[in-house]
Image (cartoon, rainbow, N blue to C red):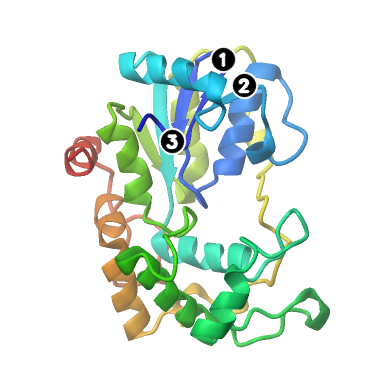
């Protein structure tokens, strides 16, 4: 199985398990910059050199050797499940992707047909009932995760605990896990623990939000998208994410964590 979704600096200063929709573009660019003193020109997900990635065959033995011997500072980053699923919906389902097309080809037409979702388009200014469509998307999300129908769950909405756990199950250990909502202090702790060829000043690092501007803006506060049924579905899908990463299930309006992360508990519960 190896270590899918794992990135490592070429200097092997740090190892990062990517969790989609959790500041991964910014983290990837920080890692790239820490080695090369410049940012990757484009979306870091498209880079094929300058950063080791499990998806690049030549990087796999290097990542595997590093992780198995726990040679470097290893970390990941998580996000509130309510804001993460909304971000996935607006970016992947409503948005036009970098290639100018809809995400995953026939996915959106299938959602329109089977779940009655509307997504709008650039031509109509993305005018549609966001709340109604999002709640229908949530049903689809639950179906993919619970029954793997009408398709396998996508990495952008599968549970964070699933991404985090593959790394542990296959023999990795995290030194740090931090929250997107408290990004700079969390990322700073990682940087403080490593020696990098180029110093990173987090205050000067731009946010690389590669999904921004491709689709509609969220028109309502987070909590308005989640009625009682939606919250029930969220708990069914993301119970472990809420509990292990200390997010407030009862109040979708509160995006901040409610307590400290317990790395031992995370390793114990996700390492089975």
Which residue sits at x=21%, y=38%? 271
Which residue sits at x=61%, y=60%? 104
Q: CA distance from mark 3 to mark 1?
A: 24 Å
Visible in this render: residue 131? no
Give the label, 3 or 1, closer to the camera.
Answer: 3
Which residue sits at x=40%, y=31%? 3
Visible in this render: residue 38? yes
Local secondary structure at mark 2 = helix
Q: Which residue is tagged 1?
A: 196
**Which mark, residue 4?**
3
The quadrant holding residue 234 is: bottom left
Mark 3 crowd level (few <14, some 14–19, many ≥20, 10 Å Cα): some
Residue 38 location (% of width, % of height):
74, 24
Q: Is residue 50 left or right of residue 222?
A: right
Quadrant for the N terminus, please: top left
Q: Which residue is tagged 2?
A: 34
Q: CA distance from mark 2 to mark 3?
A: 22 Å
Q: Nearer the viewer, residue 181 or 150?
A: 150
Local secondary structure at mark 3 = loop
Q: Earlier in the sequence, mark 3 or mark 1?
A: 3
Mark 2 crowd level (few <14, some 14–19, many ≥20, 10 Å Cα): many
Residue 136 location (% of width, % of height):
47, 82
Q: Nearer the viewer, residue 185 or 9?
A: 9
The quadrant holding residue 97 is: bottom right
Residue 6 location (% of width, % of height):
46, 32
Picture layout, residue 134 above or below residue 39:
below
């Amino acid at each position: 199985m190896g270590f899918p979704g794992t990135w490592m600096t070429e200097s092997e200063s740090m190892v990062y398990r990517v969790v989609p929709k959790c500041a991964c573009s910014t983290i990837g660019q920080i890692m790239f910059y820490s080695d090369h003193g410049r940012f990757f020109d484009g979306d870091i997900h498209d880079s094929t050199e300058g950063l080791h990635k499990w998806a690049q065959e030549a990087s796999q033995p290097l990542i595997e050797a590093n992780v198995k011997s726990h040679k470097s500072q290893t970390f990941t980053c998580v996000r509130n499940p309510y804001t993460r699923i909304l971000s996935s919906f607006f970016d992947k389902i409503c948005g036009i992707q970098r290639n100018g097309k809809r995400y995953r080809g026939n996915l959106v037409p299938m959602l329109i047909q089977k779940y009655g979702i509307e997504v709008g388009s650039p031509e109509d200014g993305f005018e549609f009932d966001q709340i109604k469509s999002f709640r229908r998307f949530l049903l689809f999300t639950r179906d993919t995760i619970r029954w793997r129908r009408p398709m396998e769950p996508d990495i952008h909405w599968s549970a964070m605990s699933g991404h985090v756990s593959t790394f542990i199950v296959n023999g990795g250990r995290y030194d740090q896990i931090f929250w997107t909502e408290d990004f700079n202090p969390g990322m700073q702790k990682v940087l403080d623990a490593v020696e990098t060829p180029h110093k990173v000043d987090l205050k000067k690092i731009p946010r690389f939000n590669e999904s921004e501007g491709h689709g509609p803006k969220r028109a309502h506060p987070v909590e308005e998208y989640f009625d009682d049924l939606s919250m029930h579905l969220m708990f069914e899908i993301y119970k472990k994410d809420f509990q292990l990463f200390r997010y407030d299930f009862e109040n979708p309006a509160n995006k901040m964590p409610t307590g400290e992360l317990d790395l031992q508990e995370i390793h114990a519960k996700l390492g089975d």
